[in-house]
Amino acid sequence: MATSAPLLKNDALPAAAAVAATTELGVLSEGYAPDSKVPGTGDQRVSMVPDVAEQLIKEGYSINVERGAGIYSGFADDAYEKKGCKLMSRSEVIRKGQVLFALEPPARDFSLMQGKTLISWVGRLQDKGKELVQKANAAQVTLLDVT
């Protein structure tokens, strides 16, 4: 017998889609440049590929991608646009995004990320990661470490 009563107490909570519909996600470039004068600058990878972005958009999220973020990973800007993402400058992605994605935490931008959440590889138990956590806390940035 089917019933419309919730199975668990929290099943009566509003659907996550309502939250997703108001949440803007931001994908940041890793800053890789093959002609950089500084060796080891940036990363060729990107924190979110177009197919993953498409799935999140289907769930109701809005996704803003920094122009050129996926280019060195083999994903042109138009691949993101075709999946429904909006392309914009780094500063716009940071300003509009409530949740930001980057492989390496961009500590230089923490001051612009006040009140936002950054999902990244922090390595919070290592010395470098501990420093990043302190910088993020000082800038009031919430870090989600996925290492």
Image (cartoon, grey):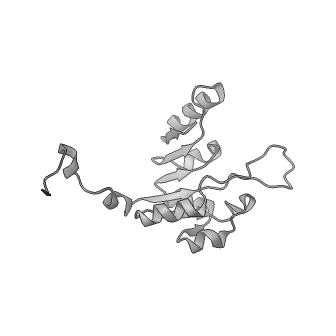
> x, y percentage for residue 137?
50, 35
Give the residue displayed 65% in from the left and 65% down from the top: 67
Q: Is residue 95 above or below residue 106?
A: below
Q: Between 45 and 134, which is closer to the camera in this rendering?
A: 45
Which residue is painted at 60% across and 32% down in the image? 123
Residue 33 in the figure: left or right of residue 143: right
Question: Residue 72 at what x, y percent from top left?
Answer: 75, 59
Residue nearer the viewer, 114 or 55: 55
Position above or below: 9 against 51: above
Quarter occupied by residue 125: top right
Which quadrant: the N terminus? bottom left
Residue 19 coordinates in the image, percent (x, y): 34, 57
Q: Residue furthest front?
A: 1
What residue do we see at 63% from left, 46% from top?
Answer: 103
As drawn, is 101 to the left or to the right of 18? Answer: right
In which quarter of the view is residue 68 placed? bottom right
Asked which quadrant contains residue 93, the reply is bottom right
Return the x and y of residue 45 as percentages of the image width and height. 70, 52
Query: Which residue: 84% across, 44% down?
Result: 39
Q: Is residue 97 above or below residue 128?
A: below
The C terminus: image quadrant: top right
